[in-house]
Image (cartoon, helix red, strand yellow):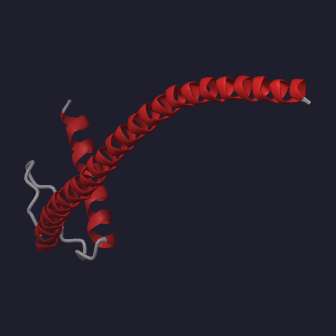
């Protein structure tokens, strides 16, 4: 078990030194008795991550506010359209009512016209009969 632990520590040291070298730390990482010292680059990386997370959070909140404003605008427009549709429905009902009244008047006019034609025909026949 101790040999396995020593091999793990050695692997960790190699990996960490390699990472440190590639990240610009100059190879100052080392594994000593289970403690890894924190370097300035790690602290700065953590701080930059936190700043980015806070900025993202604020941007998302701003997007939510913009979305809410746009949704409110859309709702107002839909309400206006709904009111216009109601007015159109009322106008259509009025037109239907006017058409029904016109139908009734047309029936009366047709009856009157028919009666007038009968009288004209009767007068025409009487006029022919006198000649």
Outermost front residue: 130
Left or right of 121 in this view: 18: left
Residue toward you, 24 or 70: 70
The correct choice, above or below, for 95 with respect to 112 in the image is: below
The one nearer the camera, 110 or 96, is: 110
Q: Where is residue 119 in the image (x, y as percent from the top left)?
A: 70, 25
Q: Quadrant of residue 77?
A: bottom left
Quadrant location of the N terminus in the rendered image: top left
Q: Count of labels shown? A: 0
Quadrant (top left/top right/bottom left/bottom right) for the C terminus: top right
Q: In this view, does 55 lie to the left or right of 129?
A: left
Please provide percent x and percent y for residue 16: 26, 59
Residue 117 picture quarter: top right
Q: Position of residue 124 (x, y in %)?
A: 82, 29
Residue that appears at 40% across and 34% down: 93
* Front residue of this view, candidates 66 and 121: 121
Q: From what the image shows, is residue 106 above or below residue 10?
A: above
117 relative position to 69: left or right: right
Name the foreground residue: 46 vs 69: 69
- Whether 118 is drawn above or below 62: the answer is above
Q: Residue visible at 21% across and 43% down?
A: 6
- Going by the picture, which residue comes out furthest to the right? 131
Q: At 57% from the left edge and 24% from the top edge, which residue is drawn?
A: 107
Image coords of residue 94 (percent x, y): 39, 37
Please tell me which residue is depicted at 20% across the width and 64% down the height of the picture.
59
The correct choice, above or below, for 13 with respect to 40 in the image is: above
């Amino acid at each position: 078990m101790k040999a396995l632990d020593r091999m793990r520590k050695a692997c960790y040291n190699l990996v960490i030194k390699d990472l440190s070298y590639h990240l610009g730390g100059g190879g100052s990482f080392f594994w000593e008795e289970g403690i890894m010292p924190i370097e300035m680059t790690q602290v700065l990386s953590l701080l930059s991550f936190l700043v980015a997370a806070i900025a993202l959070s604020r941007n998302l909140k701003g997007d939510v506010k913009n979305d809410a404003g746009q949704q409110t605008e859309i709702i107002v427009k839909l309400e206006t359209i709904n009111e216009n549709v109601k007015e159109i429905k009322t106008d259509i009902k009025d037109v239907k009512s006017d058409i029904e009244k016109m139908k009734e008047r047309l029936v009366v006019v047709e009856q009157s016209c028919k009666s007038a034609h009968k009288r004209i025909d009767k007068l025409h026949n009487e006029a022919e009969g006198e000649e």
